[in-house]
Image (cartoon, coloured by chain):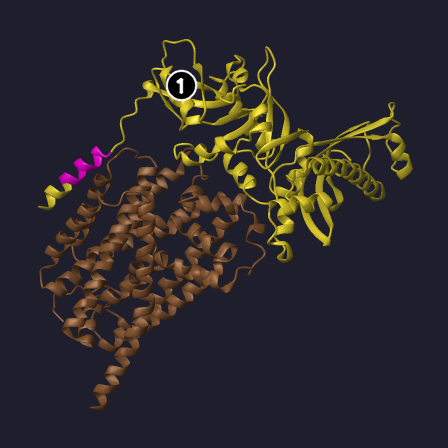
Amino acid sequence: MKSTVSFVNAYIAFFIIHTSQIGMGILGFPRIIYLAAKQDAWVSILLSGLFISLITWIMIRILNHYENFNLYEINENVFGRFIGSIINTVIVIYFIASNYSIIISYVELSLSWGYEGVYEWVGVFALLLVTLYAVSGGFRVVAGVCFLSFFITVWIIFALYQPFESLQITRILPILTTSPPEIMEGVFNSSYTMLGFETLFFIFPFIKEKDKLLFISQLAVWFTTLLVLFTTVISILFFSSKELEKNIWPLVSMISVVHFPFLERFEYIAVSIWILVIFSNLSITLFISSKGVKHIFHVKQKHGIWIISIIIFITSFFITKRVDINLFINQIGHIGFYLWFVYPILLYFISIIKSKILSHS
Amino acid sequence: MKKWLILFCSLLCTACMPPEKILERQGISTIIGYDLLDDGTYLGTISLLQFDRKEEKTSETISAVGTTSKQIRQILEQKTSHDITSGQLRTLLFNKDMTETKGISNFLDTMQRDTSIGSLIFLAITDNAEDIIKNGNYEEYPEMGSYIYQLLDKQERKEMLINSNLQDFFSTLYEIGIDPTLPIISNKEGVAPYINSVALFKNDKMVGSISLKKTMFIKLFTHRKAFLGDITLNIPVETFKQKGVSLAEKPKEDKFNITIHPIKHRGSIELSTEDEVKLNATISVSTIEGQPAVTLKNKESIKKLEQLLGEELNKEFGDFLEELRKLNSDPIGIGRKIKSLRKYSKLNDKDLREKYSTLKLKSTIKVEIKRTGAID
C-alpha cells in the first residue's frame, strides 16, 4: 500500500456505514414496503436486516482474506485484469447511478416542499458542487462528513414523539397474515433503503483497527435496521392503510403533524435538514466511484471526481418526472440487490475455491 | 480555487430563494368555506388577513364560483391585488348539503396534495359557509378564520369535541371499520358562530348529527388521553330510593342533578362470540356539583351511587349505539376492532358494515368516584 493512505479509527466506520444506508430511501420506505408486505412489513425488515448482517460477515471474511485491498483490487485479483475491470466498471456505474438517484430524488422532494418553480438543474448543480468540494478533500473529509451528518440529524427521531399520540395499535393486527412470497417481496423491495453497507468493501483499507471492524459494522447495520423498523412501525400505526399507500414520502407527511409553539410547520425544517443526511450519501458514493475510475482507467482521482460530476449534471436533464424517478429508483434497488446481496456471496465462494486450488498446486 | 468555489456556492445558494414574499403583498387566507350551488358548481368564500395599518378593516372576504377548489382559488386571485397564500390556512368549512349529497373527500384531495397546507387544519360543517365567513361578529379576533380556529382548538383540547383536523379526518376516513366525525358550526344573526353539534359520517358522506355531549361515548373508546368533558346526569329521585342511596337533604324537585368531572377513562371493545360485541368502559370521576347536596361519606352509599351513575350512563350509551346502528355509521371503530382479528382480517368495508348492522352490542360503563372535591 502507498503511504498516502489516511487512516481513521474503527468507530468511524459505524458512522460511514450507517449514514450511507440512511438517505432518501427511508423517507418513502414505509409506503414501499407496506405495498408489498402490508402490516407485516416489520417481518420483512427484520429478515432483510438478518440477511444484511450475514452479508456483512461474509464481506469481512473476504476483506480479511485479502488484507489491505478494496473491492476493485480484489476483483482484479480474483478474476484477472480483464474480467475484473468489467465487474469494476459495473460497480462504478452502479455508484454513479445511485449518486444520481439520490440527487434527483432529493431535488424532487425539495421542489415539492417549498421550492416550487426552481429549475431542477439548479438544485442538482448546488448539490454536486458541495459534494465535489467535500470529496476533493480526500477520505478523511468524507469520513468527517458522515460523522457530523449523523450527529446533526439524529435528533429528528425525537421529534416523532408528537405523532405518537395518534397511533392506533389495531392497524398492525392481526400479525403474520401476509403470505411468505409477499414478505419476501418486501425484503426484495427494501433493498434500495438498506443498501449502503457495501461501502465497507471500499473503506476497509482506511481503517486502523481491522479486528474491531466486524463488531462495528454489525453494530452499524443493526442500528440502521432498527431505525428503519422503528419508523416503519410508527408509520403503519399512524396512517390508515389507504393513506399510507397514497403518500410518496410518508415520513415527511408524518412529521408534518409535528408542531411547536414557536414553529408551526416542522416538515419544512426536516426537509431542509435532510440535505445533510444525503450529503454524506453523495460524498461517499462519489468518493467510491471516483476511486473506481482511478483504478480502472488510471487517471487521477481528482479528474475522476470531475468527470463523474459532469456526467451526473448532464444526465440530470433527462429524468425529472415523478414516474420516471420512481422507475429509476426501483431499477437501482434491483441492481443493487443483485450486486450487493448476491454478488458478495458468490465472490466469497469463488475466492475460497481459488485459494484452495492455488494452495494445492 | 477553493476560495472561488466557496464564493460561487454562496452566490448560488442565495439565488435559490423562492420568489420574494413581502408581507404587505400577501393575502393570508385563514379560512375557506365551500357551498354547493344548485347547478353543481361550488361557491368558495375566503377570509384574508389585512396588514395595511392605514386600513381600519383587519380582514377582507371574497367569494368565487368554480368546480374545483384550485379553480375557485384562481378566480379569487382575480378579485384581489394580494397573493393568496394558504400557509396559514386554519379551517375549512363545508356546507351541509354538499357533505350529505356529494361527500367531501373530493375536495380534500387537494389539501393533501398541496404541501403548503399543513395537516393540522380543522374541518367543520355548517349550514351556509358563506354566511359564516361574512358574519361580522368574531369577538376580539382580527377576523373570522382566527376566531373559528380558536373556538375549535379550545373546544377540542378541553371540552367535548373529537379531534377534527385534516390528519385525523383522513386517517379515520381511509381506515376500514371506523367513520369520521366533524363539528357542526351554527350561525345566527348578531352573534358569533358557535359549535352546535357533531356530524356523523358514513364514509365521506354526512348521515346524521349528535349532540356534543354524546361525543364522550366515542372518545371513551377511541381517544385514551382525551378529556371527555363534564357529564351532567338528571336522575329521578324515585330511583334513588329504590337503590337505597341516602341523600343529605330531601330534594324539593323530583330530579336529582349531578355533574361529574372525568379524570381518567379506559374503554375496550371485545368480540365475545360470533355476533356479540362487548363494549366495556371505566371512568374515574370526581363529583363537582350535586343538587341537592349529597353526602358521600359512607362506602356503601358511594358504591350504590357509582352503580347508579354507571347504569344511567349505560342507558344513554345503549340508545346512542342503537342510533349509530340505524345510521350504519361506526365512529367508535367496532369494525376496526373486528377487522384486527385474524378470522375477519380479509373483510372489506361492505362486509364489515353488513356485519355491524347485525351485531349484538352489549355495553357496560363503570363509574368510579375518586374524589369529591373539598367536601364529602
Q: Is residue A19 visible?
A: no
Residue B118's place in the image compared with A220, above or below, is: above
Residue at the spot of label 1: B76
Residue drawn at 86 percent across, 23 percent down:
B253
Question: What percent of the width, then of the height, locates residue A69?
Answer: 20, 71
- Magenta-drawn stretch, dominant element (helix, strand or loop): helix
Q: Is residue B45 left or right of residue A202?
A: right
Is A285 within the magenta? no
- Label 1 sits on what residue type? Leu
The residue lying toward the viewer, choosing from B23 and B357, is B357
How many marks overall? 1
User: Which residue is the extreme one toward the bottom?
Assistant: A361
Q: Chain of mark 1?
A: B
Question: What percent of the width, then of the height, locates residue B64?
Answer: 44, 17
Residue B108's place in the image compared with B145, above or below, is: below
Q: Is residue B213 visible?
A: yes
Residue A266's place in the image compared with B94, above or below, is: below
Question: What percent of the width, then of the height, locates residue B350?
Answer: 62, 44
Image colour assigned to chain B: yellow
Residue drawn at 19 percent across, 66 percent down:
A88
Residue drawn at 59 percent across, 10 percent down:
B190
Part of the protein shown in magenta? B7-16
For the C terminus of chain B, the image quarter is top right
Question: What percent of the width, then of the height, locates residue A182?
Answer: 47, 60
The image quadrant that residue A119 belongs to is top left
Image colour assigned to chain A: brown
The image quadrant that residue B188 belongs to is top right
Q: Is residue A250 left or right of residue A211?
A: right
Q: Is residue B240 left or right of residue A146?
A: right
* Secondary element at tag 1: helix
